[in-house]
Image (cartoon, helix red, strand yellow):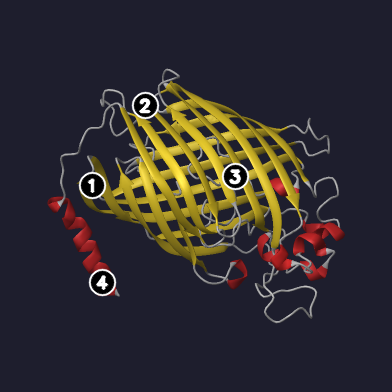
Amino acid sequence: MKKLCLLLTAVSLSLPILAQKNEIIKTGWNFGPLPVVGFDSDLGFQYGVCCDIFNYGDGTNYPQYNYKINVEASTYTKGSSVLRTYGDFKTLIPDGKLFFDVTYFNAPKFGFYGFNGFASQYDPNTIFPVGLPADTKSGYYLMSRNQFRAVVSARKTITGNLSWAAGLAFYHIKTAPLGLKDYEGQSTLFDAYKIYDLIRPNEENGGNVTQLRAGLVYDSRDHDSDPTRGQNIELSLVYSPDFIDGNGYSNLGMHLSYSHFLPVFTDRLTFAYRALVQTKLWGEIPYYFTNNINSMFFRKMYTEGLGGNASVRGLNRNGVLADGFLMLNAELRWRIYDFKFINQNWQIATNPFFDMGEILQPYRLEEQKNHPDYYNGGEKKPHFTAGLGIKLIMNHNMVVSFEGGKPFDKNDGTGLWTNIGFNYLF
């Protein structure tokens, strides 16, 4: 294994000599219609259609683009489906940026693993009640959730790489017990949490969340989608007034993310890491929104954690629900080979990674402790995962991603987590 790693390192560092250096400078409009073919251990195989639309203007700023618009319609074999459009406009606001996202998620099989991570026991073979046929598939950690999300964010330069940022977000979330025929007759953890009032009656069916966001952004990266150097910092306050449902779930939170990209060898080898902290400063968050990551400018379709392809890769999706958490992602990005195809610039890259998440503010922990069957006593332990990714990059802006990872602790998930999708994590 040591010899193999040394060989791969030598090859990756020598390929710049062999690779084609003269990139095609893109101008005007570029359309990238693609079939959506993906896989996620939590969601199943994905199929559908999408299209990336770029405008590079006169090419002066290439590989930076002036506008990017994406549309997607896809479904997963485990029942989920997605309708999404988003846009990233860098010239509509002078010295600024405008971002929007409108998405509908339908998930008849949505994971619910309880509150506070290791405080909840995970056994993938749990079937309740006992006595069901031996070939019964477990639905114990499943529920149903639909979500409509609409987000708009803007930023404008104050000086240099520092900008102010502001945004508005609206979420309509509908939650319900698992209702699929394959799981008829089973009771779930979601059902138990409702019975014991860990999930309140006024939130068990979901609700509406409106967010007002304001903060500062520092961004010195050389590229948005495929950075090789620089820093990206977002600090924001997020106020969620409960003026639609009136159930008393107004709250104020803080979101801080820091990403750093350090060139190890020219632009071929980059060490990248991200630290993210999200905390509640005041009020109460409904259980169905404890998994939301409140970034103003999205990198991934799913903006939820901890767990899944948008946060701690390899951990059960939404496996850690808490009022506040810390997350760390670190990876080594090797850009192995450059080539040209269909008049586009392409790169093949790989990214071994290490992720970590930890609870800073538990959620309804004292109430959870009152129910020993649903309290495991380990909420203060960090969650660790590690894995490897392979990337296919077009024009530095469209990234097709394959990643596989595994948690260190079986209470965070069993087997190998895999995901085929788009974009680097950060």
The dot on residue 4 is 4
Going by the numbered disc 3, the residue's amino acid type is Ile
Foreground of the two, 176 or 317:
176
Can you give x and y, in whole percent of width and height, for residue 81 in the image?
A: 58, 49
Going by the numbered disc 1, the residue's amino acid type is Thr
Looking at the image, tell me whether mark 4 or mark 2 is earlier in sequence order. Answer: 4
Task: From the image, tell me which residue sits under label 3.
Answer: 293
Element marked by disc 3: loop
Judge depth for marks 1 and 3 and give the one in front: 3
Mark 4 to mark 2 CA distance (whole Å): 42 Å
Foreground of the two, 284 or 110:
110
What is the residue that sits farthest to the top in this orientation? 94
Going by the numbered disc 4, the residue's amino acid type is Leu
Element marked by disc 1: loop
Judge depth for marks 4 and 2 and give the one in front: 2
Please indicate, yes or no, whether residue 422 appears anywhere in the rendered image.
Answer: no
Task: From the image, tell me which residue sits under label 1.
Answer: 266
Looking at the image, tell me whether mark 1 or mark 3 is earlier in sequence order. Answer: 1
State the image quarter where residue 237 is shown. top right
The dot on residue 66 is 2
Mark 4 nearby-residue class (10 Å; few <14, some 14–19, many ≥20): few
Can you give x and y, in whole percent of width and height, for residue 290 in the image?
A: 68, 48
CB-based contact (under 8 Å), mark 4 and mark 2: no
State the image quarter where residue 214 is shown. top right
